[in-house]
Amino acid sequence: MLNGLDFTKRLKKIIDFHNVSASSFADKINVPRSSISHILSGRNKPSLEFILKVIGAFENVDINWLLFGTGNFPKTTPLSNLKKQISNAPELTVEKNIPFEKIPSPPPTTSIEKIVIFYTDGTFKDFSEK
């Protein structure tokens, strides 16, 4: 059975994840803005049509996660979709023959003089070579 309070939390998580307002979320899934308001307030439970509109508009929402909290959000992308995204990605070019400047090494007589450790409580301890 669908738990209305948990469903509402998951719906809010989708809205926050996509960084949209409740009204723009309603526009995106093509439902009246009052529907979102009533569901988020707990006044109404979502209809099957509402749920189908959410998963239709947001591909990263898994229906089992939305309804029962099982699965993942955002939904993991199938491997075939990743391959398609990679094949459609622009080709990267690498410039060759860029001169590499060597970083000068310190003189061989250089040694560590002091190490200071800072703690999160604002204190510190220093270790000096003696």
Image (cartoon, rainbow, N blue to C red):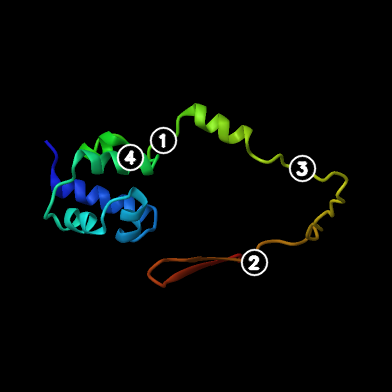
Which residue is tagged 4?
55
Q: Which one is earlier in the sequence, the residue at label 2 or at label 3? A: 3
Vertical arrangement, residue 85 with respect to residue 98, above or below = above
> Residue type at mark 3?
Thr
- Give how far across and how far down residue 121 sits, in percent: 37, 70
Vertical arrangement, residue 54 with respect to residue 17, above or below = above
Which residue is tagged 3?
93
Tag shown at residue 113: 2
Q: Residues within 10 Å of mark 3 (few under 14, many from 20)?
A: few
Q: Residues within 10 Å of mark 1 (few under 14, many from 20)?
A: few
Callout in the foreground (4, 1): 4
* Proximity of marks 4 and 3: CB atoms separated by less than 8 Å: no
Q: Which one is earlier in the sequence, the residue at label 3 or at label 1? A: 1
- Helix, strand or loop status at disc 4: helix
Numbered circles on residues, count? 4
Indicate the quadrant containing the C terminus: top left, top right, bottom left or bottom right: bottom right
Cα distance between the residues tagged 4 and 2: 61 Å
Cα distance between the residues tagged 3 and 1: 29 Å
Q: Which one is earlier in the sequence, the residue at label 1 or at label 2? A: 1
> Residue type at mark 2?
Glu
> Residue type at mark 4?
Ile
- Give how far across and how far down residue 106 sits, in percent: 78, 60
* Proximity of marks 2 and 3: CB atoms separated by less than 8 Å: no
Cα distance between the residues tagged 4 and 3: 38 Å
Query: Could you tell me which residue is drawn at 35 percent across and 39 percent down?
Result: 56
Q: Residues within 10 Å of mark 4 (few under 14, many from 20)?
A: some
